[in-house]
Image (spheres, rainbow, N blue to C red):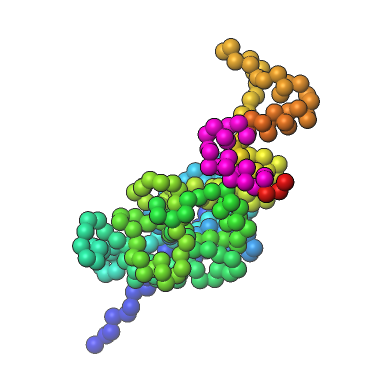
Amino acid sequence: MNTPSKSKRPLPTKSHGRLSIGATLKPRELMSDTPDLAGVWKAKILTLFPGAFPGVLGESLTGKALQQGLWQLETIDLRPFGIGKHKNVDDTPAGGGAGMVLRADVLGDAIDHAMTGTRGNWPLIYLSPRGRRMDQKMMQNLARCDGMTLLCGRFEGVDERVLEHYGIQEVSLGDFVMTGGELAAQALIDATVRLIPGVLGNQASTEEESFSSGLLEHPQYTRPPEWRGHSIPDVLMSGHHGKIAQWRQDSSEEITAQRRPDLWEAYQQRKNSKD
């Protein structure tokens, strides 16, 4: 009697970028990508919708930087880690209730796969409305990491034991609920990747923009000098760099005080502590 051979679980990895590729069953001769580039910041995404990536991350400056190998992106499909014939990834909540919850055993296997080979400072993050809200300081810290792995939830969330077992950080895009974590993951990656040296090409741009100094950015203008009865402020056309810098600082402070009292209060406290 012949014993049936065990079927191999498909390798659930898809990588993006000219200099990034993960494990695959595709024949080597049909692949145009090159292996992972050592030392390059990388985002790994655990998701039920790998086709959602790179999405907007593949466009404009972030897309160009991805192709140049300044950063790397790898998507890991949760479905192949599913249980049984139908590859189930979720089940009903313990104790009853509406909706479905992503299973601990499924997520555990997927996370173990994703974190294999990661080195250095590599946070594991779950996109969740109950997490810490994203801010510029968070992005600056993540850009200094070696990479990060993001878990995109669906349905009613994930089994709490997974978050506890791996010490996963919960991060929120804002105080609202979405159908899944994919859009929040793209926002987090975009805001982080743009801080990686060489991605924007102009370091001064990241130093002067909103939140970098604790203030909202000042108004911006360009050609034509007059449009539909609206003119560019005279000081910006004066060529006096000192006065322009002061106008921009004053405008940033005024806008921040009006629109974001929370930021303005924190800015004032930091300013007073330095005096």
Residue farthest toward the bottom in the current orientation of the protein: 1
- Report the quarter where the N terminus lies: bottom left
Q: Residue at x 46, y 68 (%)?
A: 167
Viewer-closest of 223 and 10: 223
Report which quarter residue 112 is drawn in: bottom left
Viewer-closest of 271 and 3: 271
Q: Tell me how many marks there are.
A: 0
Q: Residue at x 50, y 68 (%)?
A: 115
Residue 150 in the image: x percent, y percent? 47, 58
Magenta highlight: main SS: helix
Q: Which residues are magenta?
A: 253-272
Q: Residue at x 47, y 61 (%)?
A: 169
Tell me if residue 254 is in the magenta stretch.
Answer: yes
Can residue 173 be seen at all in this image of the molecule? yes
Q: Residue at x 53, y 38 (%)?
A: 261
Say whether residue 245 is left or right of residue 75: right
**Above/below status of 6 relative to 93:** below
Residue 122 in the image: x percent, y percent? 55, 64
Tell me if residue 19 is in the magenta stretch.
Answer: no
